[in-house]
Image: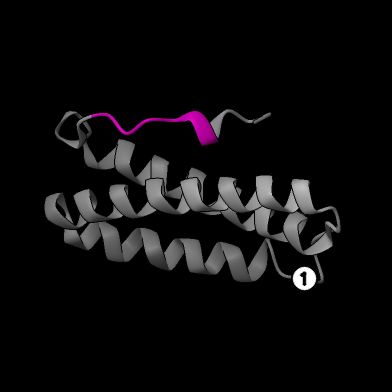
């Protein structure tokens, strides 16, 4: 994959602090949204399969980080998910995506 994210392997989450987990969540969430938009515009079967695989991996990474952050800092989890929802509504809305 061109962004390398589909080849990311989860390292023992105990090595991550809340700031790193938040960064993983933000990065994977935004990449998932952009990949989803690309998927919606793609007609070729092979490219759609590639994009589906990428979205699946990003989703897995997001929820692994989310689970760890929930254990380490539940308040930060609520905060970051609120920020992500706001970003998706404002930055990635259909009217703004080209």
The answer to whether residue 15 is magenta is no
Most prominent secondary structure in the magenta stretch? loop
The mark total stands at 1
Is residue 27 rendered to the left or right of residue 89? left
Circle 1 SS class: loop
- Depicted 83 relative to depicted 35: above or below: below
Foreground residue, 11 or 25? Answer: 11
Foreground residue, 4 or 97? Answer: 4
How dense is the environment of label 1, judged by Cα within 10 Å: few (below 14), some, or many (20 and up)?
few
Residue 80 percent across, percent down from the top left: 37, 58
Which stretch did the figure color magenta? Answer: 6-11
Residue at image coords 57%, 62%: 87
Residue at image coords 45%, 62%: 83
Is residue 11 rendered to the left or right of residue 82? left
Display coloring: one colour
- Depicted 7 relative to depicted 58: above or below: above
Quadrant location of the N terminus?
top right
Residue at image coords 49%, 29%: 7
Foreground residue, 58 or 96? Answer: 58
Residue 45 percent across, percent down from the top left: 79, 54
- Depicted 2 relative to depicted 31: above or below: above
Residue at image coords 44%, 30%: 8
> Which residue matches tag 1?
94
The answer to whether residue 9 is magenta is yes
Residue 64 percent across, percent down from the top left: 29, 49
Task: Single out the residue that lies furthest toward the front.
Answer: 45
Is residue 47 rendered to the left or right of residue 3? right
Is residue 28 rendered to the left or right of residue 22? right
Residue 16 percent across, percent down from the top left: 22, 33
Quadrant location of the C terminus?
bottom right
């Amino acid at each position: 994959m061109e962004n390398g994210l589909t080849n990311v392997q989860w390292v023992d989450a105990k090595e991550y602090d809340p700031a790193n987990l938040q960064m993983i969540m933000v990065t994977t969430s935004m990449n998932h949204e952009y990949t989803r938009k690309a998927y919606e515009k793609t007609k070729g079967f092979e490219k759609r399969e590639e994009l589906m695989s990428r979205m699946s991996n990003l989703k897995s990474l997001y929820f692994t980080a989310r689970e760890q952050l929930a254990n380490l800092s539940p308040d930060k989890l609520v905060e970051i998910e609120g920020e992500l929802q706001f970003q998706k509504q404002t930055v990635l809305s259909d009217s703004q995506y080209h």
